[in-house]
Image (spheres, rainbow, N blue to C red):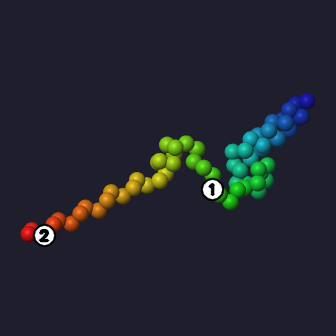
Amino acid sequence: SLVLHFEHLKCFSSRLFLLHHPNLNYSPIPPSPFPAPPLSPFLSINITPPPLPPPPSPPLPPS
């Protein structure tokens, strides 16, 4: 029964591995052409660069 238990553990761990690494050859869900959404808004904020500040307006010529 120990061998069966080990086989079950191996199968379970491989399924768990595939769940965490869906970009492998075998995945139960077909890969979508779109990139995966960020896990949380905080991650998306950290990944995207901050918006550039507006360029300073040129000084007005003295009248």
**Residue 62 x, y percent position in the rendering:** 9, 68
Q: Which residue is mark 2?
A: 61
Q: Residues within 10 Å of mark 1 (few under 14, many from 20)?
A: few
Q: Which residue is mark 1?
A: 35
Q: Is residue 2 above or below residue 40?
A: above
Q: Residues within 10 Å of mark 2 (few under 14, many from 20)?
A: few
**Residue ranking furthest to the left:** 63
Report the residue at 31% width, 59% height from top: 54
**Residue ranking furthest to the right:** 1
Closer to the camera, 58 or 63? 63
**Residue 59 x, y percent position in the rendering:** 17, 65
Q: Amino acid at mark 1?
A: Pro
**Residue 17 x, y percent position in the rendering:** 73, 44
State the mark number for residue 52: none
Q: Quadrant of residue 49?
A: bottom left
Report the residue at 39% width, 55% height from top: 51
Q: Is residue 36 above or below residue 58?
A: above
Quadrant of the frame with the N terminus: top right
Q: Is residue 1 above or below residue 58?
A: above
Report the residue at 63% width, 52% height from top: 36
Closer to the camera, 54 or 35? 54
**Residue ranking furthest to the front:** 63
Q: Secondary structure at mark 1?
A: loop
Q: Nearer the viewer, mark 1 or mark 2?
A: 2
- Give the left or right position of residue 25, taking residue 52 as reference: right
- Give the left or right position of residue 22, taking residue 54 as reference: right
**Residue 22 x, y percent position in the rendering:** 71, 50
Closer to the camera, 56 or 62? 62
Q: CA distance from mark 1 to mark 2?
A: 50 Å
